[in-house]
Image (tube, rainbow, N blue to C red):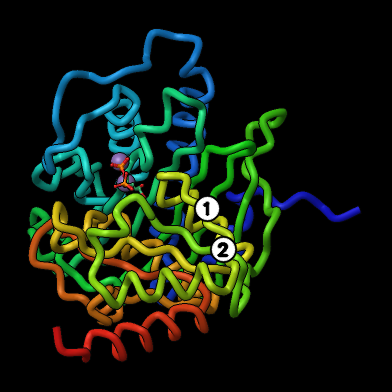
Amino acid sequence: MNRIVTLDEFILRRQKDFPYATGELTGLLRDIGVAAKIVNREVNKAGLVNILGFAGEENATGDKVAKLDIYANEKLIECLSNSGECCAIASEENEDYVPLPVLDGKSPKYVVVFDPLDGSSNIDVNVPVGTIFGIYRRKSNASEPATLEDFLQRGSQLVAAGYVLYGTSTLLVYSTGHGVNGFTLDPTIGEFCLSHPDIQMPKRGRYYSVNQGYYLKFDVEMRRYIDHCSDLNLRLRYIGSMVADVHRILFQGGIFLYPNTRKYPHGKLRLLYECNPLSFIVEQAGGKAVSCQLARILDIEPRDLHQRTTIAIGSAEMVDEMVDFVQRYSALPV
Ligand code: AHG
Ligand code: MN
Ligand code: MN
């Protein structure tokens, strides 16, 4: 029988993979692992306590905020303050970045971006939700307060990224740029255990994932590509939690699309804390991620913490095919 490898043990073993292997990133990843367990506990009992429903607020980008969004946000901030390795965070739920307290003797070198609860409209109906995170080495001097520039780094500068999926079981998937590994939470011992080592995405898959209800709002080239997916008899799956939709594709192959619509002319999903971390993971697993305007997601220069982007992410050959469709059909005269 294989020996159980816990997330903490794995992170420590892999510390040497990281160019600045001083244990700081290790501390940060462990903080995120602890936050994930706490959020998982609350997500699991969401139906039992009076925590369901909306808090009656709107977040920085105008969405309704569910109570669990706020809870998850607070827990991530609290846990990331534990090791003292993170100087500031940027979250979907905070309009501006939030500096964290500096612990005695520490000069934190990292900033963390996150979507504390992705797919939060699904909580009330027991559909999987997730947490998405990305870790950057700060640009500013470690003895000074963090600056906006620390956060406005391209996705290709990420030193680590990952997500937690609170699904039929709870999984934490992360990468430090040396492959992708997945850990399943064993609730009996309260530990994330290595369950999916060295995840590699299939080059093609049988699934496509897009909100097809917006079909008529998409540009013609995107409609043609979606028609092509349908012609190929690909199976349409759309959960409405990006993290869960991308998770399926990571394991089974396929493509996830969120193109521009009339309502969201630049796409709906956020570059910093949704698209970049998931693109980092997908690329590390052999897949690709581009905008529907064909820029590599990880190369997009962020100008704003809550910037949106269109996205096509998934199996390498399928993303290449989507790129072909865009190039072919957008060249047509209108
Ligand atoms: P969040 O719950 O963090 O606001 O994210 C919801 C996002 C994403 O997870 C999902 O793929 C997308 O919104 C769904 O949008 P539509 O309902 O427009 O398809
Ligand atoms: Mn989200
Ligand atoms: Mn969210």
**Viewer-nearest residue: 204 or 70:** 204
Q: Identify which residue is drawn at 40% across, 75% down.
A: 225
The secondary element bearing badge 2 is classed as strand
Which residue carries the number 2 mark? 207
Residue lying at the far right of the rendered structure: 1
**Viewer-nearest residue: 122 or 31:** 122
Q: Point out the quarter of the image occupied by ligand 3.
A: top left
Measured as percent of width and height from the top left, residue 323 is found at 36, 84
Image quadrant occupied by the C terminus: bottom left
Quadrant in the picture for residue 265: bottom left
Which residue carries the number 1 mark? 237
Circles 1 and 2: CB atoms closer than 8 Å? yes
Task: Tell whether 105 sits left or right of 251.
Answer: left
Q: Identify which residue is drawn at 14% across, 52% down.
A: 263
Task: Tell whether 308 sits left or right of 193.
Answer: left
Q: Identify which residue is drawn at 44% across, 31% down.
A: 39
User: Neighbour class for label 2 at 10 Å: few (<14), some, many (≥20)?
Assistant: many
Measured as percent of width and height from the top left, residue 259 is found at 28, 64
Q: Identify which residue is drawn at 58% across, 49% down.
A: 8
What amino acid type is highlighted by mark number 1?
Arg
User: Neighbour class for label 1 at 10 Å: few (<14), some, many (≥20)?
Assistant: some
Residue lying at the far front of the rendered structure: 334
**Total numbered labels:** 2
What amino acid type is highlighted by mark number 2?
Tyr
